[in-house]
Image (spheres, helix red, strand yellow):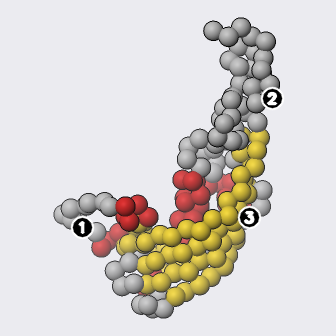
């Protein structure tokens, strides 16, 4: 879904619901070799034009099949999350502006007017939540580098050194 910023009235909320097809989700996550969508990504979004920026609130639902980086086992991660972003038109930021980030700015995203690429913004947010470490669980023990035993399933008989 692409929304044109000039169609958003100041102070009036625009709401929409949509789905991103499985093939598009898979294409976005293509650099994660073992990531596959188990269904479309559905979302409800509310955009409110505040004049100098646009507030985006979204509820996202997506299930991904992933492969654990430590033990190599497949697992499913479900995202059922709420997202809040502040959208700022890229041309409103000049190169001479001194950029000082505070905690609130971590949820600020720029876009190229007049189009706001909602699907891409939401997919990027999910991608960032994967945090670069796709683990089946935070206590994953991985595999034995000697014999290949999945240590989550039990200890191996290799000598401990």
The quarter holding residue 59 reads: bottom right
- Distance (Cα) linking label 1 and label 2: 55 Å
Query: Which residue position holds label 2?
Result: 153
Going from the N terminus, do you reach mark 3 or mark 2 first?
3
Q: Position of residue 121 (x, y in %)?
A: 53, 65
Image quarter where the N terminus lies is bottom right
**42 up-or-down from 136: above or below:** below
Q: Position of residue 86 (x, y in %)?
A: 43, 72
Residue plotted at (61% across, 55% down): 28
Q: Are marks 3 and 2 in contact (CB under 8 Å)?
A: no
Of labels 3 and 2, the one closer to you: 2
Q: Are marks 3 and 1 in contact (CB under 8 Å)?
A: no
- Distance (Cα) linking label 3 and label 2: 32 Å
Under circle 1, the secondary element is loop
Is residue 6 shown left or right of residue 144? left
- Distance (Cα) linking label 3 and label 1: 38 Å
Q: Nearer the viewer, residue 12 or 117?
A: 12
For residue 35, which numbered disc appears in the image?
Answer: none
Q: Position of residue 94 (x, y in %)?
A: 24, 67
Image quarter where the C terminus lies is top right
The quarter holding residue 138 reads: top right
Mark 3, other Cα within 10 Å: few <14 / some 14–19 / many ≥20: some
Going from the N terminus, do you reach mark 3 or mark 1 first?
3
Residue plotted at (51% across, 81% down): 47
Query: Which residue position holds label 1?
Result: 94
Q: Nearer the viewer, residue 54 or 115?
A: 54
**14 up-or-down from 157: above or below:** below
Query: Which residue position holds label 3?
Result: 40
């Amino acid at each position: 879904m692409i929304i044109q910023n000039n169609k958003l009235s100041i102070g009036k909320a625009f709401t929409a619901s949509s789905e991103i097809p499985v093939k598009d989700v898979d294409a976005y996550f293509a650099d994660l070799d073992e990531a596959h969508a188990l269904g479309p990504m559905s979302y409800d979004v509310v955009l409110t034009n505040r004049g100098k920026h646009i507030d985006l609130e979204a509820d996202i639902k997506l299930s991904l099949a992933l492969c654990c980086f430590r033990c190599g086992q497949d697992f499913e991660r479900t995202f059922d999350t709420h997202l809040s972003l502040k959208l700022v038109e890229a041309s409103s930021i000049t190169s001479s502006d001194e950029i000082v980030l505070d905690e609130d700015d971590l949820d600020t995203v720029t876009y190229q007017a007049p189009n706001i690429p909602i699907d891409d913004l939401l997919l990027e947010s999910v991608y960032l939540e994967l945090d670069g470490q796709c683990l089946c669980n935070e206590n994953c023990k991985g595999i034995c580098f000697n014999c290949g035993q999945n240590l989550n399933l039990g200890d191996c008989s290799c000598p401990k050194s």
